[in-house]
Structure formats: C-alpha cells, structure tokens
Image: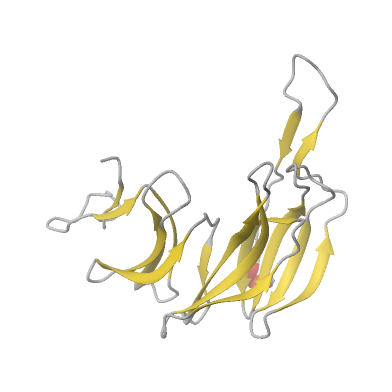
C-alpha cells in the first residue's frame, strides 16, 4: 500500500523485535517523544496532500496506538512536548494566499494531553514564515523569515520568543547580516530566477 511502518528494534543490530507487529504511520507524519520516553505523539496523514491528518499516541512499552479526536487539514513542520509532558505544541497555517496557495498567518496550538483539549494560543504576523521552533523551559523560540505573498524574503531572519504560560510574544530579534529564504536574482535565461537560502542552524537549549 506504500504506507510507512514503525518497528521497535534491538540495539545495536536494528533487528525488529520478534513477535511485535509494526504500526502504520500512513503516508507521512510528524512525531515527538514524551520526556519520559513512554509516549510517542504522531500526526499522521493518509495521502500526499495535507488533508485528513489526525493526532495519534503510541504507548511505547505496550506498542499500541490510540487515535485522538484532533484532525488537521494542513501540514506542520514540528510537534513538541512541554518539558513536563503535559502538553503538545505545534505551528500550523491558518490561511493560504489565494493566488499562489502558499501558507500564511501561522498560529501556535496547544494540546492538553490529560484533557484532550486543543486551543489556539497565539497568532504570528501574516508576513512571518516560521522555519523551526524549539521549547526550552517555559518559552518557545521560533526562527523564521519575513516573507511576501510571492514567497520571497522581505528581510533578514527573525527569532520570536513566546512565553508559553502567558501565551504572549516577549521579544522579537532580527538576525541582521544573515540572508535566508527565497530571493529573486538577476534575470538570466540559463539560470533559475529564484534562489533558496537556508543557513545552518543549531540550538544550544541547555544554555538558552
């Protein structure tokens, strides 16, 4: 069927554990492991489109999967557990540019693991295209680039810091001198007219 499958394996041989059935991860997925290592949260999409996604939870010790009631009609780049495992966070586009179909107006969502409640806690500026995000302590750092509705970078990348307890942006830092995102270059019939720049990014979360 072409579906992706997950197997628990032995280390270091990577041999699948005998007698344990694989779990289907459907066509594509995004996943996060809980801080205690016992729960794998995964958003699964059944086809190559971004429609029909659903949040699932895999209990790692018993290797069983349970579907939640949360459905997603678009893709997400990353999902993350809160440090205490009580919540999941992800960024998802809320609107799309009508002319080009590109995502706009990303929002930050929180899923409460204990209650199953989902809430939108913050909406980013429509011109900001998030690339990556990481949780450290009670804050979320979001790295991205101001981007036009033509998907062209409108300035250097920025770093948003979000206070998760208060659901507010506490600071925005512009990373001056760094080029990132898609840019238009001088017309040349022998070259593709757009160039995509993605500088290397590393997170030093222990030292914030």
Report which quarter residue 130 is drawn in: bottom right
Seen at 68% across and 64% down, the residue is 142
Query: In the rendered picture of this protein, how many numbered marks are placed on residues?
Result: 0
Q: Quadrant of residue 61?
A: bottom left
* Way the structure is coloured: secondary structure
Q: Which residue sits furthest left? A: 19
Nearest to the observer: residue 206 or residue 181: 181
Can residue 137 be seen from the camera position used here? yes
Instruction: Say which residue appears at 45% left-offset and 75% top-offset.
Output: 35
Is residue 32 visible from the viewing direction of this image? no
Left or right of 158: which side holds 88? left
Is the N terminus in the top left, top right, bottom left or bottom right quadrant?
Answer: top left
Q: Quadrant of residue 141?
A: bottom right
Query: In the rendering, at what x and y percent does residue 124 appear?
Result: 72, 66
- Residue 163: where, in percent of width, then height? 69, 79
Q: Position of residue 187 (x, y in %)?
A: 83, 22
Q: Residue at x 55, y 55 (%)?
A: 77
Pick the residue in front: 185 or 202: 185
Q: Nearer the viewer, residue 208 or 42?
A: 42
Location of residue 17 with respect to 89 vertically, above or below: above
**Along the horizontal axis of the image, is 183 left or right of 92?**
right
Where is the C terminus found, in terms of image quarters? Answer: bottom right
Q: In the image, residue 158 lies at what x, y percent?
A: 78, 59
Q: Residue furthest front?
A: 98
Residue drawn at (83%, 56%) of the image: 175
Residue 208 placement, left or right of 71: right
Q: Is residue 173 left or right of residue 90?
A: right
């Amino acid at each position: 069927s072409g579906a992706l499958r997950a197997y628990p394996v032995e280390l270091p041989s990577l041999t699948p554990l005998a007698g344990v059935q694989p779990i289907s991860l459907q066509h594509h997925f995004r996943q996060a492991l809980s801080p205690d290592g016992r729960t794998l949260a995964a958003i699964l999409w059944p086809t190559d489109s971004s429609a029909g996604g659903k949040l699932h939870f895999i209990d790692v010790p018993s290797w069983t999967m349970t579907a939640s009631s949360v459905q997603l009609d678009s893709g997400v780049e990353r999902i993350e557990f809160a440090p205490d495992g009580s919540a999941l966070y992800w960024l998802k586009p809320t609107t799309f540019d009508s002319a080009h179909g590109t995502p706009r107006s990303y929002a930050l969502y929180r899923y409460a693991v204990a209650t199953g409640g989902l809430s939108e806690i913050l909406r980013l500026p429509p011109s900001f295209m998030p690339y990556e995000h990481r949780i450290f302590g009670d804050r979320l750092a979001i790295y991205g680039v101001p981007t036009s509705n033509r998907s062209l970078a409108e300035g250097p990348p920025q770093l948003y810091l979000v206070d998760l307890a208060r659901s507010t942006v506490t600071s925005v830092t512009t990373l001056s001198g760094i080029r990132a995102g898609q840019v238009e270059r001088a017309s040349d019939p022998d070259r593709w007219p757009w160039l995509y720049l993605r500088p290397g990014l590393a997170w030093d979360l222990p030292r914030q």
